[in-house]
Image (cartoon, rainbow, N blue to C red):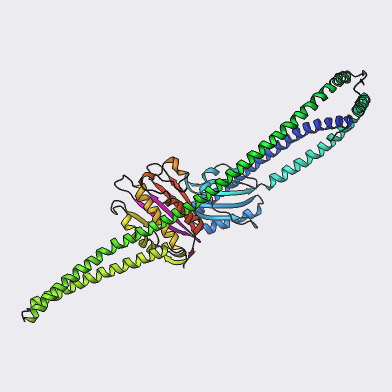
Amino acid sequence: MQTISLKRGLITIVLLVTSFALAIGFSINVVSQVSQYQTSITKRVESYAKIVAGNAVQSVALNDNYGETRRLAPLANSEFVEHVHIYRLDPNSGDLSFFSSYNRDGLAPIPAKFAQLEQLDRPRWTPDYIEVAEPVKLDQNIIGYVYLRGSTGEVDQFMWRAIAIAVVVFIITIIVCWLISIRLRQRISRPLERIVDIVSQVARDKNYALRLADSEIAEFNELSDSLNIMLERVQRQITRQQRAEREASQLNAELEQKVTQRTQALRESNQELLTTLEQLHQYQSQLVESEKMASLGDMVAGIAHEVNTPIGLSITASTLLQDKLALMQEKFDENRISANEFSRFLSDCDESLTIIYRNLNRSAELITSFKQVAVDQSSEVDRTISVCSFMRDVLTSIKPRRLDPEKFPIDVQCPEELQLITKPGPLNQILINLIVNSMVHGFDGRESGQVTISFELMDDELEITYQDNGVGVPFDLRKKIFDPFVTTKRGSGGAGLGLHLVYNLVTQVLGGSIHFFSEQDHGVEFTIKFPVTPVS
């Protein structure tokens, strides 16, 4: 153990107490000054925001963003203002749009603050800046907002200047206290030296018969008496300590043996857990693949169901045409064909051939659509797709599993010209699983419902918003909705892997993100975002 001299300790205590008191006083003073300066900065940023808002009324009302940009240019003379945004409120839709901005030279522009305007009605401080929002009003009506961000550099400079002054005064005061403590040390060091000599002899020679003499200072006299009593008890304490050490050594040996045994048992248990976990991952992968194959099997059933109808109509029309042709051949051989009969025969032929052509063409379109969907489901290769056409194929393949389309319509909101390069296979499986999830779970026990799927391209990212107005998700399942084997249809054949598969496809295959929102009896909403390559 590192020791210090009592002489130096006395000086250290005096200096520490003095330093502590001074530090508290200076800290309170600096904090108070900085707080007052921050208050003035807060008032300044509010004033700037109100001035800019007042000047922007005419430009916002006339939609003159060029003029407003020129009006903001003089802000370059202020080192305090870093960024200014002006947003215009659409009088018809009520939506905010970016109107004009100012960015101090050398600073990169910042994103729009539409969502934070309501929280910035009062200035908000951050370590690097202060920001505030002010409404732009015309005849007491809000026609826009001003967002202003100011620098906190002045506050930092003021704070460091105040700290520097406090440090200088602190050093001077410590030096004075040090000189005073030296004088005080000299008066009490002599009796302390006598006590130290006796104690050193006892420690060196282990002669506990030595005793300390009385001192002129009452406190040291009490210390001497206490040390004398302690010397009498030290030997007994040493004996007890030696006995306790022997007992502790024995207990430590027993404890080490128990720890070794428990560690070995724990290692074996961990190995069993790892083996079980690996098996669970294998079973999970097998179940996910089974889910994909089940989806493909449903699509094959859909092919048979959808293609049977037009082919059946074609067979019926061709059979009818064959019968009429045989009858006409018989009359022709007997020379009993009239002009009216031949005319009706030609009309019937034309009608039957039209039916056959139309239904066979429909069958070809369905097979092409199902073929594309099947290829997409088994492929993770990027290709160019038209989103609207892609959705029509998806809805066609999912038709056999859908509820009544009139009672449970699916509204697809997508620009017709939207084309992009992505992995259609995972996207196909994501949409099919979400739609089937709504049909099986969301609309269970309901007479009607609606699904809305909207697509929006933002730069190089596609955002898909999927909504239904079904029964929603119970509160206790919302936090684990994407976990494997989570389902409300456990006793009805549900495996609980649909949304888990969706989550893995979005995050791992497409490299995107998925967010889930739901309220009981108010449906669900999934927001999916992932990178794509737009086709211009």
Q: How many marks?
A: 0
Residue 403 picture location, percent across and down: 30, 52
User: Toward which corner of the image does residue 344 lie, by quadrant?
Assistant: bottom left
Left or right placement of residue 504 versus residue 19 in this view? left
Left or right placement of residue 140 versus residue 220 in this view? left
Left or right placement of residue 294 versus residue 320 in this view? right
User: Toward which corner of the image does residue 332 lie, by quadrant?
Assistant: bottom left
User: Would you say residue 62 is visible in this rendering?
Assistant: no
Q: Main secondary structure of the magenta part?
A: strand
Residue 242 vs residue 83, the one in the foreground: 242
Residue 277 picture location, percent across and down: 53, 48
The residue shown at (68%, 40%) is: 37
Residue 491 picture location, percent across and down: 37, 44
Residue 100 vs residue 171, the one in the foreground: 171
Residues shaded magenta: 443-468
Q: Quadrant of the N terminus?
A: top right
User: Would you say residue 391 is visible in this rendering?
Assistant: yes
Q: Is residue 291 magenta?
A: no
Residue 164 picture location, percent across and down: 78, 42
The residue shown at (85%, 22%) is: 235
